[in-house]
Every structure is written in C-alpha cells, then in structure tokens.
Amino acid sequence: ADCYFMQKEYDKSLECYENALSMFKNIDTVGRDHILENAHVMCMLGVSSFMLLMYSRAASTFELALHMVKYAFALSNTFFHGLVLALMGISFYKMRNYHRCVSMCFQSFEIFCAIHGDKLPELPKNKFWLVCQTLYVMGNSYNNLNLHQKAVKYLTVARSVLMASKNRD
C-alpha cells in the first residue's frame, strides 16, 4: 500500500490499506508496536482517502488513528499526535467545517509548541512544512469564520516561523 501511495496510485493504495485492516483484526498479537502499525495503516488510509477527495472519510479515519496513537503512547503527546490532529484539521477545512478545523489545528499547534518550543524553525523540512500548513489553515479558517483578528494572529505567527527558518524553500 505504501508503495502504491508513493507512486500516486491512490485507488490501489486505498484498497491495500483496507485489506491490511482486515488482517490486523485477525492477529492475536497485542502491544504498542502492533497498535502503532494499525495507527500507521489508519493514518495512511485517511491520507489516501483525502487524496481521492473523500474528506469526510479521511477525517473519520484520522480520528480512529488518533485514538490508537493516544493509547499507544499512554496519552503523552508526540509528534505523531500533532500530525494526526493537523491532518484532521486540514480535512475539516476541505469540508468547510471551519470550527472543527480550528479546534484540531489549534490542538496540533499546541503539541508542536510543547514538544519543540522555540526550535520550530529548525525542524526538518517535512515537519516544518506541517507546522506552517497547520498555522495557515487555522488562520484561513478563522478568516472564513469572520474572526479576522484571530486570522491575522495565526497567519502572522506562520509568517514569523517561516521567516525564522533557514528552510524556507
């Protein structure tokens, strides 16, 4: 499924992730690694659904992945938590559910700040992009909700983080 996804064959990817889910149900193994494997499959099932413009399904799938991640990490926040929350927020944005988008993106950004603090501009490109995208989507959602001061606040934070980074490309 991961290979199909990397080749941008999202239909095949989606089918393989769905098949993988049924295999995980039948395995009698337990433990953190098993839960994280399931969370990865759920997350990628959500991303594949998102790429196929099935935003509602993507958001629901990300929510299930989030519960698995919380369980696997005993409710302590990790970057994976922030990732899944950000993906949920972006999915809600695409569905024009701006209130839920803001909620998910805000939680995600709080996690990123708690984990990385002032080091956000020094994150690797893929993580840094996610933080900036989360802030942008949150700011734009506030704008769509006619909460312009909050929109300007988070778009300004996004710009500040971007300008502080050496990885602006």
Image: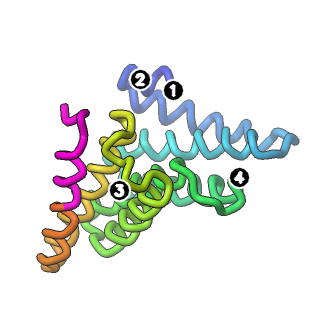
State which tag comes first along the sequence, 4 or 1.
Answer: 1
Crowding near the residue tagged with mark 1, few <14, some 14–19, many ≥20 C-alpha atoms within 10 Å: some
Picture quarter containing residue 105?
A: bottom left
Could you tell me what secondary structure mostly forms the magenta stretch? helix
Vertical order, 109 against 124 (above or below): below
Q: Are marks 4 and 2 in contact (CB under 8 Å)?
A: no
To which quarter of the image does residue 88 belong? Answer: bottom left
Q: CA distance from mark 2 to mark 3?
A: 20 Å
Q: Residue at x 22, y 65 (%)?
A: 154
Residue topped by disc 1: 2
| Element carrying mark 4 | helix
Specify the amino acid type for callout 2. Met
Q: Position of residue 19 (x, y in %)?
A: 62, 35
Magenta-drawn segment: 157-169
Name the spot of residue 55 as percent of width and height, x first: 36, 54
Asked if marks 1 and 2 touch (Cβ < 8 Å), the reply is: yes
Q: What is the quadrant of residue 109 in the picture?
A: bottom left
The answer to whether residue 59 shows anywhere in this view is no
Residue designated by label 4 = 72
Mark-to-mark CA distance, 3 and 1: 20 Å
Which circle's residue, 3 or 1, is located before the other in the chain?
1
Q: Could you tell whether 144 is left or right of 86 in the image?
A: left
